[in-house]
Amino acid sequence: MSLSAKAGKVALQALATAGNMIAFAIITKGLQTATTTIDNWIHRVEKANEAMDEVVGEYESAKSSLENVNTELEEQNKKLDELLAKDKLTYAEKGQLEELQAITQELLLQQDIEERRADKASKEAANKAVDAYKKQYGRYDKTEEDLQGKLSYENFPIPEDADDVLGMIAAYIRAQELLEQSQKEFDDAVKNGEDTTWLAEDVQYNIDAVDDYRQALDENISDLQEKRLALEDEYNKAIEKRESGAEPLTSSEKDVIETYESIYDVMRMVYEYTDKNTWKSMQIESVFDTECIEKTKEELIEMVKAGEFDENTLQSYPKLSAALEQNKVSASELCNELEALAEAEGNVKGDTFNDKSPISFNIGTYKDQINDIKSSTAALRSALDSLNSGDLSKIQVLDLMQQFPSLVPYIDLTAE
């Protein structure tokens, strides 16, 4: 019994020691997991953006591969068409035709593979962009009403952090107002002969504040644009699918549309409160760049010049009207822009080409200019005579081509 008791005591001690080791291991593992979780939370935006950048790179690679296959396939089809257009083929041409057909079949298979790869990469890029946008900007205000609320604060609206875009806009606007106020106070003090030391420091502080907020907003715009571009292809597909009504949208497609339009609205507010004219110009250029619109920018300008285009005639161009709606450009804004462009072109042409008044040159006497022209002509004639007789070395020919660039198309340096 004594031996059993001792054995039992040893066993209990062993179990206690083992229990302590297990408990310590569990606690250590728990701390490691907690540390990893906290680290992931702190760096969640950074990790989400890295994941987005990675899949966007894969999508660009997939698109490039698809473009290469399409180019090669187009070249093969041209060769095929040339052979098939012939009434009769030689045996060599028949062999070439069979080879081209085999290559084309292989390229078609490769094209299908690359299309699937690009389509998958496009979806992944869009999903990662949605995730990155939500993690980076999801908890901040994003509407016009939210911005107006921030601007209504009596105190200076301090942004929560660098990703609080509306907070940045509000701070930028207030900083501009403070700069104007401090500049006015400084100017008044100068006029009244008062001490301006403190006022000058205040002006400089506000100048730097405006610049800091503007730089922060520029960084926001750059980041938002990257995410918008990552979403663009899938957004266009989702919009087309929604408009066709053939199939219901998936949750992923709805997220893409919502995120893309949210990014667009945030970017619009940044521009409208910091550089409204640039934003409107970009919107109108986006209209002109829309594929398949009925009239190009140049054609529309010519129509305006001829008095054949206005807000009423716009109804005749549904694709152009749709492009205006998509880019949030009104018919009057488009017409105003086209009229301004037409007027600018008219002024240039009128001033430069259509003005019939005599042109005056302030070059003094013509004697020196005429002598220079004669000298150059003589030098050219002499050089051409030497070139024709084969007396010039290649280095001398190169010097001649550099002196008279208009000769370049007529000289073959590869000829012996």
Image (cartoon, rainbow, N blue to C red):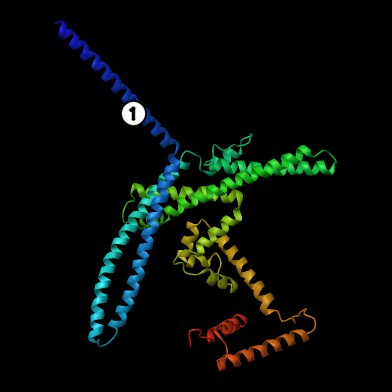
Q: Out of 27 and 402, give the one closest to the viewer.
A: 402
In the image, what residue type sits under mark 1?
A: Lys
Q: Out of 62 and 36, give the one closest to the viewer.
A: 36
Tag 1: Cα neighbours inside 10 Å, few (<14), some, or many (≥20)?
Answer: few
Left or right: residue 40 versus residue 18 is: right
Q: Out of 246 and 208, give the one closest to the viewer.
A: 208
Instruction: Name which residue lies at 25% across and 76% down.
Output: 99
Query: Horizontal and vertical percent for residue 274?
Result: 61, 49
In the depicted structure, whether residue 27 falls above or below residue 257: above
Residue position marked by numbered label 1 in the rendering: 29
Instruction: Name which residue lies at 54% across and 38% down.
Output: 161
Which image quarter is the N terminus in? top left
Q: Quadrant of residue 92?
A: bottom left
Q: Quadrant of residue 84?
A: bottom left
Left or right: residue 342 versus residue 315 is: right
In the depicted structure, whether residue 223 falls above or below residue 367: above
Q: Out of 138 and 313, give the one closest to the viewer.
A: 138
In the depicted structure, whether residue 71 falls above or below residue 401: above
Query: Horizontal and vertical percent for residue 356?
Result: 71, 81
Check the image and name the residue furthest to the top. Answer: 2
Check the image and name the residue furthest to the right. Answer: 193
In the depicted structure, whether residue 42 falls above or below residue 355: above
Query: Horizontal and vertical percent for residue 291?
Result: 45, 65
Left or right: residue 192 versus residue 252 is: right
Q: Quadrant of residue 4?
A: top left
